Image: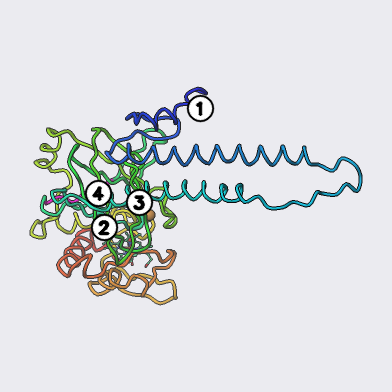
Amino acid sequence: MMREFLTGGLLHGLLGEAQSSVWMPPEASTFASDMDPLFYFILYLCAFFFVLLMGATLWFSLKYREKTPGQRTSPIKHNGRLEFLWSAIPTVLLVVIFAWGQKGFVSLATPPADALDVRVTGQKWNWTIDYPGLNKSCGPTSVTDPVTGLQGLQTDFYVPAGQPVKLTISATDVLHSFYIPAFRLKRDAVPDRYTGYWFTADEPGVYDLFCAEYCGQQHSEMRGRVHVLTDLEWRAFLKSSRCPTLNPDADDYGEKLYEANCKTCHTVDGSPKVGPSFKGIWGKTESLADGSTVVVDDNYVRESLRNPNAKIVAGFAPGMSVFDSGKLDDRAVNALIDFIKSLGEGGDIK
Ligand SMILES: [Cu+2]
């Protein structure tokens, strides 16, 4: 373990092995083997100069320490050759680092024309992955952690192995960051803007997906799994019912919208979560935080979506994301209203 710790990184970097080391997760994209050597180059360069500079500092402070009381320093003239070298050597090293990094950045930012188009949207606190043209859209699903047994949300992101994938990334609320460590890929998801990168995942398997930008309370739960599929698995995925695109003509459109957009914060079984449960709220007289009341009807639900902070339910903190017409069009709002209605007009029953 210790030997691996000391040499694993260096050998791994120099040989470009597709394995995880003590320092790094597995290299699961074609960029990882380009990027890791640069990382190790900078790491070992820093280690070398750290030892050199700290060693020299220590050695000089011992060698030139005051030996007799009142001893005076000899007048130091400057040394042209030394000064040239301590400027020129770091300059050359920094230019090498810049050129190496720039080359990697340019290739990450220029996807090939035949790349598979994927849209990534970050929101508090999960990811949505859309595949325009494939009629698929992967939202968060509820999972149980095998270790802790806790329930949480997870977004599954499926990609074909060996095929370039182009990401168009954005966010609906605050800054997030789309991060797949095994691909060495991290890009900010910014509201009102598109960012992008591309990658080719070359090792079939399952990898972690994180949000790498502190985006609020449940930031650490904003995670997913990237499934790199073999050719056969990818074709099966395309035909499967996994990640279906929502069909506005289907009877369960409202329920599907609820699962994709609201389930993180609202239950349908009467138990409060981040927001109140939807069960039996239709027609109910709701008490608001400012002491007034409102009857839950079409207009109130619509306002809750378009302008969530206009009326805050008593006992809850404001925190609902805005669903504007770009996110949920009128048809979607109507379907959600019908879905909430279908959960029963409980009046004041909780
Ligand atoms: Cu986030």
Q: Does the numbered disc 4 mark a residue whose Cβ is under 8 Å from ligand 1?
A: no
Main secondary structure found in the magenta portion = strand
Closer to the camera: disc 1 or disc 2? 1
Give the mark nearest the N terminus, 2 or 4.
4
Give the mark nearest the N terminus, 3 or 1.
1
Q: Which residue is mark 1?
A: 6
Three-letter amino acid code at the position of disc 3: Gln
Three-letter amino acid code at the position of disc 4: Trp
Q: Which residue is mark 3?
A: 102
Q: Quadrant of ligand 1?
A: bottom left
Q: Which residue is mark 4?
A: 198
Residue shown at 14% from the left, 57% from the top = 253
Residue shown at 71% from the left, 39% from the top = 58
Q: Tell me the magenta residue range.
A: 135-141
- Picture coordinates of residue 248, whole percent (x, y): 11, 60
Within 10 Å of disc 1 (Cα), the crowding (few <14, some 14-19, many 20+) is few
Q: Is residue 136 magenta?
A: yes
Near-viewer residue (210 or 161):
161
Label 4: state its secondary structure: strand
Q: Which residue is mark 2?
A: 261
Closer to the camera: disc 3 or disc 1? 3
Disc 1 to disc 2, C-alpha distance: 47 Å
- Picture coordinates of residue 123, whole percent (x, y): 32, 58
Disc 3 to disc 1, C-alpha distance: 28 Å
Near-viewer residue (224 or 285):
224
Label 2: state its secondary structure: helix
Give the mark nearest the N terminus, 1 or 2.
1
Closer to the camera: disc 2 or disc 3? 3
Near-viewer residue (294 or 177):
177
Residue 330 as seen in the image, left or right of residue 219: left
Label 3: state its secondary structure: helix
